[in-house]
Amino acid sequence: MFKKILIANRGEIAVRILRACRELGIKNVAVFSEVDRTAPHVRLADEAYSIGPAASRESYLRIDKLMDVARRTGCDALHPGYGFLAENPALPRACSDAGMTFIGPSAEAMEMMGAKTSGKQLARRSEVPTVPGTDEAIENPEEAQSLARSMGYPVLLKAIAGGGGKGMRVVPTDAEFAGAWRDAASEALNAFGDPRLFLEKYLIGPRHIEVQIFADAHGRVVSLGERECSIQRRHQKVVEEAPSPVVTPELRKKMGEAAVRLARAGGYTNAGTVEFLVDADLNFYFLEVNTRLQVEHPVTEQVTGLDLVKLQIAIAAGHRLPFAWEAITPRGNAMEVRLYAEDPDNNFFPSPGKILSRHAPTGPGIRLDEGVYEGYTVPLEYDPLLSKLIAWGNSREETIARLRRALDEYTITGIRTNVSLFRRILAEPEFLRGEFHTKWLDELLARPSPPATPPRPGTEDASVIAAALWHTTRANSAANVNRTTSAEPSRWKSQGRRQQLDRTP
């Protein structure tokens, strides 16, 4: 096993990885930008080193700075987490050049399967169903528009190097094509440094379902089942669950076999996710491969009992997968919501700032993967993900009940969060019946919001009271400096005496 691992990321995923390292007895090294100096992953790491200013391009995206820290600290492996450089083939190549192990797939597998067009070509060669569309980038917008007309609207423009909904536009009519092309190319250039686009037929009301795969270097490839990821806002996932409420055992087997077949054809190793679109008739179509650990990996961990980060590390160290696909028997249901520092009542405007107080939910079936703490200042420079709240239950109904209860227990003051969004989703009859698709949440948010649910007795203005108490405590502490003498009675004693007098007959 490795002796020391560099974690090339930040936030909750960096915390998640370093905890797995600690349980395995492996030393870990964190990196941080100037604005992340007090971040949780920095506080918890065995070692932590600054790599530059707040801007990602000057810190977390600088491969040369990461390699320098790894060399100076004697790391023999690097874990990229997700986002940033996790799907950039240049990082595993840099690790190889430095004599260090990259915990993930090879650069060649990333290039073949991670790029949307080459991944689609591989899927077709592997007899995996694909959405009708182009296999390569289209350089000429007029040519793309002509193809869209022959394909029939609506169509979908997608960035070659895309992810997270960036560089993606649905084009309903021919008249809107030119503007959509211009906007998608511009967004793709800003987000990925690559403006190239390709074209797909847009499916009406599909579900987004992904299959978690693992492959070792000894030829074993397994599927760990599916995750339902259809609850999305503007192509960004916000709620994920396992298993999907619509996937039958037969469909699960077919999708799993297709995902494994694709991974074998691409010479894939380590963790990956094969994403599919599923239509109303339960026909599935290849969408893309994420060549990394997913944000939503905890729901698979909850239903399988496996630690996916430890599996990643073990496979990268050359170990065999300790089980076959047939040995995996998912148990119960798990659901994850992504808690963001944003205001759903103000068009999801970011809400950076200092966390004055927080209370984390606990209890049966509840897990919280966090990247914040009380007193921490949430920066504006990065994705506003605060925490991932995961619930597990024996049934989907029990999971939802536990998640509702946990959301009621979760409190945070000083910033706004999107907790109210999840309360609304979990109350919707369509969601409870499992009847939704990838545009369902956008359609829900376009409707008028229902009247706010009155707070439970005793919780009115809890956040205001907590914030006021915090400020009052600070003010009192400052005012009382050097004033307290040995003769002055303790406030705790005075309060106790008053209570004792009140109880005296």
Image (tube, rainbow, N blue to C red):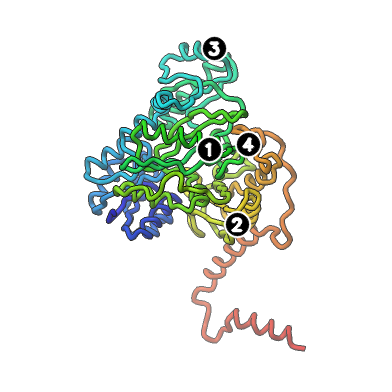
Q: Residue at x 51, y 41 (%)?
A: 226
Residue where numbered disc 2 is placed: 411
User: Which of the 4 quarters of the picture holds residue 155?
Assistant: top right
Where is residue 108 drawn, in percent x and y? Answer: 31, 33
Mark 2–mark 4 CB contact (< 8 Å): no
Q: Is residue 217 left or right of residue 438?
A: left
| Marks 2, 4: nearer the viewer | 4
Q: Residue lying at the far front in this picture: please name it.
A: 326
**Of callouts 4 and 1, the N-terminal one:** 1
Whether 236 is drawn above or below 35: the answer is above
Q: Mark on residue 149?
A: 3
* Amino acid type of the residue tagged 3 in the rendering: Arg
Q: Say few, some or many: other residues with alpha carbon within 10 Å of mark 2 (under 14 / 14 to 19 / 20 or more).
A: some
Earlier residue among tags 2 and 4? 2
Q: Secondary structure at mark 3?
A: helix
User: Sequence-wise, which precedes: disc 3 or disc 2?
Assistant: 3
Provide residue 151's location: percent of width, then percent of height. Answer: 53, 14
**Label 4: how many Cα within 10 Å (few below 14, some 14–19, many 20+):** some
Taking the spot 64% from the left edge, 58% from the top edge, the residue there is 464
What is the secondary structure assignment of the residue under circle 1? helix
* Lower sequence index among marks 1 and 3: 3
Q: Is residue 102 left or right of residue 477?
A: left
379 is higher (above) or lower (below) than 108: below
Query: Which circle's residue, 4 or 3, is located before the other in the chain?
Result: 3
Tell me the kind of residue under disc 1: Arg
